[in-house]
Image (cartoon, grey):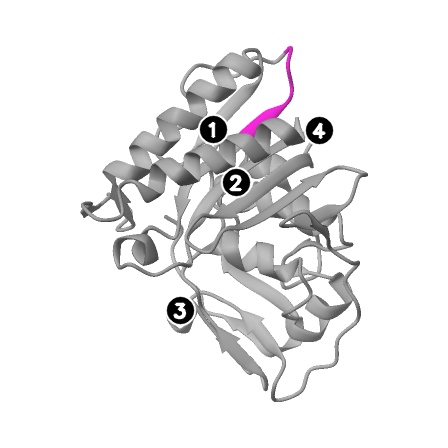
Amino acid sequence: MIEFIEKTLKDAGKLALSFTHNVKGILKQDRSLVSEADLEVEKFILSCLKTSFPNDNVIGEELGSGEAQNQKHPRLWAIDPIDGTNPFLNGLPTWGVSIGVMENGKPIAGGFYMPAVDEMFLALEGEGATKNKKKLPNLKDTEITNQTVMLGPSSRKRFYKIDYPGKSVAYGSASAHVAYAATGGVIAALVDRPQIWDILGPLAVLQEVGGGAYHPDGHSLDLEKLASGEKAEGPVFFGLKENAEKIFPLIEVYPRPKS
């Protein structure tokens, strides 16, 4: 399974790169961007999954879940062909391809590949996680100082207030944020209302180094609730729980209608 994920991510990334010099984006109904590259890369990944795992369920950002889910095969694959379409369209390197698979509400394998910088994150449940084939160490309890980095969405100022004393960085890709949280280079990643395809691939990596996904009240994200494409309730922290708990008291979520 992990060999399939790695090869498919590499091939999908190569396909995505072939569009970078002549591609335009359009706004979807939810005001997010999509391009021809997103659609073609997702079709490619779907074809690979249909060949190698024909009985498994699949959901993708652009093409949805396709056929009705097969209850006899509880595995669910979630794919994001290009997470970070805005950076992709603007010639920035912080975008990538995400593939994850879960069973019984838990990630069992996944990966995230950033073709422009050739960074590959991979994990298989119980076997550890790697970045470019180098094993990632377990995450450690981190002190917050004025130089401690946290990753988060640039849109957060519209949805909540966070009194964070360290550095906040936004790369424009939720998948990249979760993947980098797994490296220990940041204290946590904050993702606003993620969907399953945004996070499942890199969450498998984060899980293998001791991390997880948590709401501001401290309870874990329920992936089963996202399995049909719904958005999570409010912001979600990704990282070591002990680190995320240091940030929970610093956030004030603004009331807003669901969409």
Question: Overall secondary structure of the magenta stretch?
Answer: loop
Which residue is at the front of the view, 44 or 160? 44
Labels 4 and 3: the sequence-earlier one? 4
The reply to whether residue 65 is in sight is no
Mark 3 — residue? 154
Labels 3 and 1: the sequence-earlier one? 1
Mark drawn on residue 196:
2
Residue 219 quadrant: bottom right
The reply to whether residue 135 is in sight is yes
Q: Please report the residue visible at 55 percent of the width from the left and 46 percent of the height from the top.
A: 199
Picture coordinates of residue 68, whole percent (x, y): 47, 15
What residue range appears in magenta?
Answer: 72-77
From mark 4 to mark 3, how far is it between C-alphas? 33 Å
SS at badge 1: strand
Picture coordinates of residue 121, whole percent (x, y): 61, 48
Three-letter residue code for mark 1:
Ile
- Other residues around mark 4 within 10 Å, as few (<14) / some (14–19) / many (≥20): few
Dot in front, 4 or 3: 3
Mark 4 — residue? 104
Picture coordinates of residue 144, whole percent (x, y): 69, 82
Mark drawn on residue 59:
1
Q: Please report the residue visible at 50 percent of the width from the left and 24 percent of the height from the top.
A: 58
From mark 3 to mark 1, how far is it between C-alphas? 26 Å
Position above or below: 106 against 154: above
Position above or below: 53 against 137: above
Labels 2 and 4: the sequence-earlier one? 4
CB within 8 Å, label 1 to label 2: yes
Question: How many numbered circles does the render carry?
Answer: 4
SS at badge 2: helix
Q: Please report the residue visible at 58 percent of the width from the left and 56 percent of the height from the top.
A: 178
From mark 4 to mark 1, how far is it between C-alphas? 16 Å
From mark 1 to mark 2, how far is it between C-alphas? 8 Å
